[in-house]
Image (cartoon, rainbow, N blue to C red):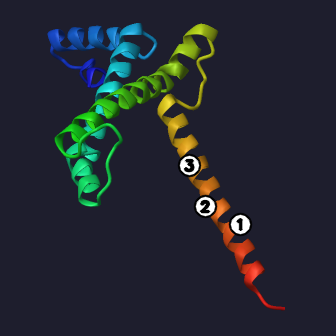
Amino acid sequence: MAQFFIKSPVDFLANFSATLSNVFAPEKPLYNIIYFLLVIGFTFFYTSVVFNPNKIADEIKKHGGFIPGIRPGTATAQYLTYILNRITLAGAIFLGLVAILPSIAQQLTGVTTVILGGTGILIVVSVVLETTKQLESMLVMRSYEGFLKKE
């Protein structure tokens, strides 16, 4: 948005936008810090939306399961929340580092023509993993089909 308002006829808005554009430029450390913190924050937000420890604890209890050493019900939900937060923190830090890694590499090496950003790397890796799973399932399916054919 700051880039949009740089050409504003209002001097104050144009100067403020130029300053903001300069401070939050992708090659500046503040940009990388804020980007890293946003990735961590949204990782925790997404995890809290998708994974409900109380529901999981109820499902475990309903099906007669339990976690050894943990009482069913509220204690299980608290334990799942504790474990979830620890795992999410490690994952969020990893995702944040992957997201800002290309920018750090550009600053260290001076090469500014990196085509793939951190988010793009994550997408490419997930697509490759999904494609590998599909190929493996097709190979297993073909192998079983050939095995079951009577000749």
Query: In the picture, which quadrant includes the N terminus?
Result: top left
Name above or below for residue 143 compared with residue 131: below
* Relative image position of residue 95 (x, y in whole percent): 45, 28
Q: Secondary structure at mark 1?
A: helix
Query: What amino acid type is highlighted by mark number 1?
Result: Leu
Name above or below for residue 79 compared with residue 61: above
Which of marks 2 and 1 precedes in the sequence?
A: 2
In the picture of the structure, the residue carrying the numbered disc 3 is 127
Mark 1 and mark 2: span between their CA atoms? 9 Å
In the picture of the structure, the residue carrying the numbered disc 1 is 139
Q: Nearer the viewer, residue 103 or 19?
A: 103
Query: Which label was assigned to residue 149?
Result: none
* Relative image position of residue 13 (x, y in whole percent): 17, 14
Q: Secondary structure at mark 3?
A: helix
Left-right relation of 1 to 91: left
Query: What amino acid type is highlighted by mark number 3?
Result: Val
In the picture of the structure, the residue carrying the numbered disc 2 is 134
Mark 3 and mark 1: span between their CA atoms? 18 Å
* Dot 1 crowding, Cα within 10 Å, few <14, some 14–19, many 20+: few
CB under 8 Å between callouts 3 and 1?
Answer: no
Between marks 3 and 2 in the image, the one whose residue lies nearer the viewer: 2
Left-right relation of 9 to 4: left
Residue 11, visible in the rendered structure: yes
Residue 43, visible in the rendered structure: no
Which of marks 2 and 3 precedes in the sequence?
A: 3
Residue under the image location 34 percent in, 13 percent down: 24
* Relative image position of residue 149 (x, y in whole percent): 76, 87
Query: In the picture, which quadrant includes the C terminus?
Result: bottom right
Left-right relation of 45 to 144: left
Query: What amino acid type is highlighted by mark number 2?
Result: Gln
